Image: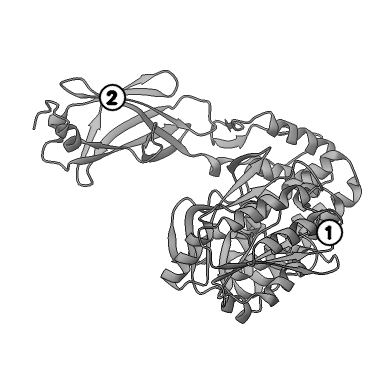
Amino acid sequence: MIPLLSIIVPIYNVEPYLAECLKSLAAQTLEDFEVIMVDDGSLDGSRRLAEDFACRDARFVLLDQPHQGPGPARNLGVRHASAPYLAFADADDVVPPGAYDLLVGSLQETGSDLACGAVLRIEDGEPGPSSLHEKVFRRRVLCTHIMDRRSLVRDRTVWNKVYRTDFWRRRRLEFPAGIYEDVPVAMRAHVLATSVDVLDDVVYHWRRRDSGEVSITQRRTELSNLAERLAAIRSVRAFLDDTAPELLDTFDGLVLEKDILFLFQALESGVDAGPVLDLARQWVAELSPAARAAAPSLRRLELHLVQRGLIKQLCRVRNFRRASPEGTRIVPRGWRETKWYGDYPYFRNRRLAIPDEVYDAQAELKLLATVDECEWTGQEFLLRGQVAIHRVKRRLDKLNVWLTDGSQKVPLEVKRAGKWGFVATVDPRRLQGGGPTWKLQTRVEIRGLVFKGGFRDGEKNGAWRLSVAGWSRRGMDIPQ
């Protein structure tokens, strides 16, 4: 009988983790599946563990191949897959019990070509957010596409997904040999899909190994590893340039945010500094000018130092970044014409002569406005909150706050409290004739710059609204 889902598991020297992975697959609430394990020439006890599972559970089958890497192992598994839906799991990771029920169920409901979900990163046995995935899966969106939802460029792993097998084969998706084989395939699938389901449920636990053989991603500062990562990036860029050039700048931005870090770490270690520097310059040169220009100012400084081969100075800047976990400062310079620059090392250093535009951080300024407390005193609302410009330590020059229901505006008298705090009162009689819900808005000025925006709820971290009707329903004596 043909199963509903085929799960491909490449196996190579993962004895400390394999049993937990296979147990998580056996415990899936979707029970109609086959697990195709492919032993890629393991030298430890991994094959024996896989054989034991295949003997105990008829849904598990074991294939063998000489050691060729995870890509060819997955390809072999796909060739033997018989189900209408297809998934991949790495042998050192864990799949939550309801993951495939959710993913397959979504595809059955929508008809999309693939469904993907959120990921947790397991480090030292504890699950936490995956920085690569967390911005993608904050809310559920069905029948979307990477061209409409550009954040899916970050979703470049194959194992937090279920695919339609006919889509996979019709589009001739195949993993290349070598490492980082999943990045080109994941990007191709997203672009070539007719539609994609994005779930906010956690469907995969991605492990950082703490024993046994070190994983590929944990050897990512080795020169050969860096070269293969660049090859994967080039493969994706060539595909996007041919089929979806609109995504190139977004993809390059992610490379500058994530992948470039491993080059910096390799340069900081001092091992193979010359060849790594040559490779780093290749990386930077191949990225789009628009993506490099849009990078945050501190990253642009790091790139500038790499291009000039200033490794000692790069190490100092990297240490400076690590010493500022809450964010580096942005400061104003000039009186007749104020410009805003990152407060970083080597600014206007005569010997290095780094151009001012490398430090230009004005585009990174953003308004932060929160309401920390809203209290009914018996006669009026008392609001306490904070308004600041992110990464700017200076006090605001001007602060205006008002309420609006969309059709009318009610200015509030504001008292400043400390550098960024404020207190304001609201007499509900001033809101008579207006809507039941009001937005709190602000306008601030600092050294000639003007910012406008709404407030966030300091406790719930969502948009803040004053609901007069809601307070009335609590039985409080509010004039109507």
Q: Name the residue under label 1.
A: 42
As shown in the figure, which amino acid type bears the numbered disc 1? Ser
Q: In front here: 414 or 374?
A: 374
Q: Where is residue 112 in the image (x, y as percent from the top left)?
A: 48, 71
In the drawing, does residue 43 fall left or right of residue 299? Answer: right
Q: Is mark 2 on a helix, strand or loop?
A: strand
Q: Position of residue 256 (x, y in %)?
A: 68, 51
Q: Residue furthest top?
A: 418
Quarter the N terminus occupies = bottom right
Residue drawn at (45%, 65%), measured in percent from left and top? 106
Residue 443 visible: yes
Rendered image quadrant of residue 253? bottom right
As shown in the figure, which amino acid type bears the numbered disc 2? Ala
Q: Residue 116 carries which label?
A: none
For mark 1, does the 10 Å Cα neighbourhood hold few (<14), some (14 to 19), or many (20 or more) residues?
Answer: some
Q: Which residue lies furthest to the bottom in this view?
A: 170
Tag 2 or tag 1, which sits nearer the N-term? Answer: 1
Q: In front here: 462 or 121?
A: 121
